[in-house]
């Protein structure tokens, strides 16, 4: 099994450009998450989807939108990229339940110039 | 805003030494997890603790969840160079419509041979 996959692995954008980060999981998990990781800031939740058909804002949602396309796929869109969105983005998924154990993808390193 | 503070932020030790990493919060969590992350990869789950006072051992790693479920510690005995990485604690918030983790800022561990 591939687990959680993310595309692309690296991306460079100019300010104002848009792009979509793709995430897919093959573990039949209900919940999926998008995080960003910046030096000294740990992982911060952008958006999450507790189940297919629902999405909720996390700690840092401004400038992002998400789509839970189906149970497997959860995409993150930057409509107008800004230098402050330079970061490493991780997608994760988890089974339902209180343990909330998450399985992460390999990440997308995004640079906005 | 829920916060998880990790200490220390950085730790550089010699092979064979012992170390403890702390994770503290004023919030009560339904679960507490520890992840390890290596450069260029996503975090990988090490352990989940769910009961106040719970202690789990994973070879040379000992994890403890505080009695009040607000804090946790990770103790490594006889550290080895293979233990090098970023250690992240994460508190689980579960209930109603909420289903997410709050991550600490991380502890970067370097074990010198």
Image (spheres, coloured by chain):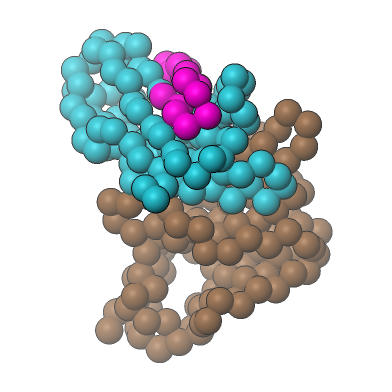
Q: Is B43 in front, or is B13?
A: B43
Query: Residue at horizontal 41%, vertical 34%?
Result: A24
Tell me what residue is drawn at x 37 percent, y 48 percent. A2
Taking the magenta stretch, the answer to whether it contains residue A62 is yes
Residue B35 lies in magenta, yes or no? no
Q: For the point 35% across and 40% down, which residue is it?
A: A5
Q: Which residues are magenta?
A: A58-75
**In the shown orientation, is residue A13 left or right of residue A65?**
left
Instruction: Kindly tell me whether residue A43 is visible in this rendering.
Output: no
B76, above or below B1, in the image: below
The quadrant in which residue B100 appears is: top right
Where B37 sits versus A67, above or below? Answer: below
Rendered location of residue B48, percent (x, y): 63, 60
Residue in view at x 35 percent, y 85 percent: B15
Q: Is residue A112 visible?
A: yes
Q: Colour of chain A?
A: cyan
Q: Residue B62 is drawn in which quadrant?
A: bottom right
Count numbered badges in the picture: 0
Q: Chain B's shade in the image? A: brown
Q: Main secondary structure of the magenta part?
A: loop
Q: Which image quadrant: the N terminus of chain B?
A: top right
Residue A111 in the image: x percent, y percent?
23, 30
Location of residue A22 in the rendering, given as x and y in whole percent from the top left corner: 35, 28
Looking at the image, residue A38 sits to the left or right of residue B89; the answer is left
């Amino acid at each position: 099994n591939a687990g959680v996959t993310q595309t692309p692995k690296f991306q460079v954008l100019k300010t104002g450009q848009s792009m979509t980060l793709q995430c897919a999981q093959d573990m039949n998990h209900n919940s999926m998450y998008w995080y960003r990781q910046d030096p000294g800031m740990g992982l911060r939740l952008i958006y999450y989807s507790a189940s297919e058909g629902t999405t909720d804002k996390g700690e840092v949602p401004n400038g992002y939108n998400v789509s839970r396309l189906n149970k497997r796929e959860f995409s993150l869109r930057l409509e107008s990229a800004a230098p402050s969105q330079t970061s490493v983005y991780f997608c994760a998924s988890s089974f339902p339940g209180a343990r909330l154990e998450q399985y992460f993808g390999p990440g997308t390193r995004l640079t906005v110039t | 805003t829920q916060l998880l503070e990790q200490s220390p932020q950085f730790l550089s030790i010699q092979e064979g030494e012992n170390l403890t990493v702390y994770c503290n919060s004023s919030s009560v969590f339904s679960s507490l997890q520890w992840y390890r992350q290596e450069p260029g990869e996503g975090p990988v789950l090490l352990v989940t603790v769910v009961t106040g006072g719970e202690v789990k051992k994973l070879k040379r790693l000992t994890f403890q969840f505080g009695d009040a479920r607000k804090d946790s510690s990770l103790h490594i005995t006889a550290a080895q160079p293979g233990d090098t990485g970023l250690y992240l604690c994460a508190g689980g918030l579960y209930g109603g419509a909420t289903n997410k983790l709050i991550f600490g800022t991380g502890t970067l561990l370097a074990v010198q041979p």
